[in-house]
Amino acid sequence: MNNKFGSWSFYKRALLLALPVMAQLLIQNLVSLIDNFMVAGLGDIKMSGVNVSGQINMVYLVLSNTMCVAGGIFMSQYNGAKSDDDMKHVYRYKIVVLMLLGILYFAYCFSGAQWALQFMVRGNANADAIIAQGSLYMKLIAFTWLPLPFSMAISTSLRETGRVKAPLYISVGATLVNTFFNWIFIYGNLGAPRLEVRGAAIATIIARSLEALVFLGYCYITNPPFFSKFRNIFKVRLRLIGNILKKSAMILVSEMSWILVETFTSSIYNGRGGAEVISGMGAGFAIANLFLICISGVQTAIGVMLGGTLGAGKLEEAREQKTWFTSGALVFGMFFGGCCTLGIFMIPVVFGNLSDGARHIATQMLLVNAFYVAVWVYLNVLLGISRTGGDTLMGATMDLSINLLIALPGILLISKYTLWGPVLMFAVIKLADLVKILYATIWMRNEHWIKNLTN
């Protein structure tokens, strides 16, 4: 066996953990692609309204996911240490924090999110029409942020404890429900009114609510070790909250600096033309996401396997697993990057109703994403290993420094001094991720991540 690569049994176990997560995301993204196909049938402007709303909602979703990731560091290690009581406290922390965030974001979206929408389409030739559609969508989609905390807390906890099949089946069912009601409400089938953009939001509300109910029902029936009934949900150990918040502070700095810069750069891309830019780039990302599922799969395997090894106190074994994961990530990423290029054949089929300009931008975006897949997989493996061992400082300093000192000034200079199109701007700015890999590789030589957090 080569020291750089683990045994087949190691990668087989990793795949058994990763593949159900990837299958879940693949089906979700396929259904999302069908949703995009349905919305694309309404034209560039209405699809742009939904896509811009998605860019804004991503800030909230990343924030919520960050809270789950911080708790997940402890959930994985407590699972390795077989400490059910501590796992319950981590789960309660997730529910309480996500509920608070969900209520606050619900209030903002229900108001129409006018300021955010205006910011995202500055300089766009069709700004007013896109804002009108986006505001309509945001007021309704607000209701999905109330059930989502339960789905997110339960699904992430199940994955972090190695129970990856249940989230797969439940989320697949929810996404199929979403597609069915999209078909009914967007175009007015089966006697329903034709609601177009509002119909897309209503379908998502139904699917998210059903998903949360099924996740709760599953937990009440199977009683996983982390699950705590709602009457006990506010009984969270204060010391544990303090520890999680200490870890989440650094992750929060990392993730929010990333998503805020991403959102700002997206607003600049959106201003380089009309609705065809927003709808075209959204279409390219929709297909690319079918292949970027590999990132979440690898991160789940790292969290369960490496987190369990560290939690059990097997630090030397954890050091070996780190090498095996990083080496495997290169092969895994290149394979999915190659597959991503084949997605160009889907664009005329799925997005045939978009304008020629939008389809051209979608093709270019997909090819750029295919080039970067291996880069993003490797970078996220390094981040996953670091965070699993409790070293959240690496990601925070890396993202904060490179995003604010390279990516942000870079996009401002490019937008001011060039006439580049949005795809070329995206391709150049993403070169900063190569600098992040160099930064992370050097940092991890200090091995700050090799820690047992359960002591």
Image (cartoon, helix red, strand yellow):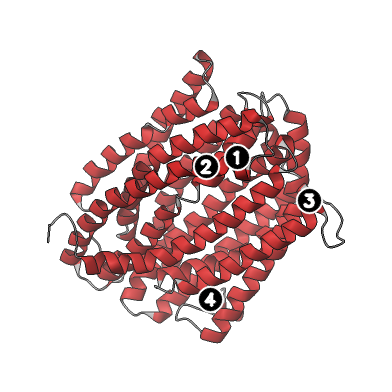
Q: Is residue 111 above or below residue 206?
A: above
**Mark 3 or 4, nearer chain start:** 3
Residue 104: assigned label: none
Q: Residues within 10 Å of mark 3 (few under 14, many from 20)?
A: many
User: Do the CB atoms of the residues marked 2 and 1 lie less than 8 Å apart?
Assistant: yes
Residue 40: give x, y in percent of width and height: 69, 43
**Marks 1 and 3, Cα distance to the nearest angstrom?**
26 Å
Residue at the location (63% across, 52% down)?
Answer: 34
Give, as a three-letter code, the residue at label 4. Answer: Lys
User: Do the CB atoms of the residues marked 1 and 4 lie less than 8 Å apart?
Assistant: no
**Mark 1 or 3, nearer chain start:** 3
Residue 348: assigned label: 1
In the visual, does 370 lie left or right of 389?
right
Q: Nearer the viewer, mark 1 or mark 3?
A: 1
Per the image, label 4 sits on a secondary structure element best described as: loop
User: Do the CB atoms of the residues marked 2 and 4 lie less than 8 Å apart?
Assistant: no
Q: Is residue 453 visible?
A: no
Name the residue tied to disc 3. Answer: 198
Name the residue tied to disc 2. Answer: 345
**Mark 2 or 3, nearer chain start:** 3
Q: Residues within 10 Å of mark 4 (few under 14, many from 20)?
A: some
Per the image, label 1 sits on a secondary structure element best described as: helix
Give, as a three-letter code, the residue at label 2. Answer: Phe
Residue at the location (78% across, 45% down)?
Answer: 136
In the visual, does 175 lie left or right of 291?
right
Q: Is residue 152 above or below residue 420?
A: below
**Marks 1 and 4, Cα distance to the nearest angstrom?**
53 Å
Q: Nearer the viewer, mark 2 or mark 3?
A: 2
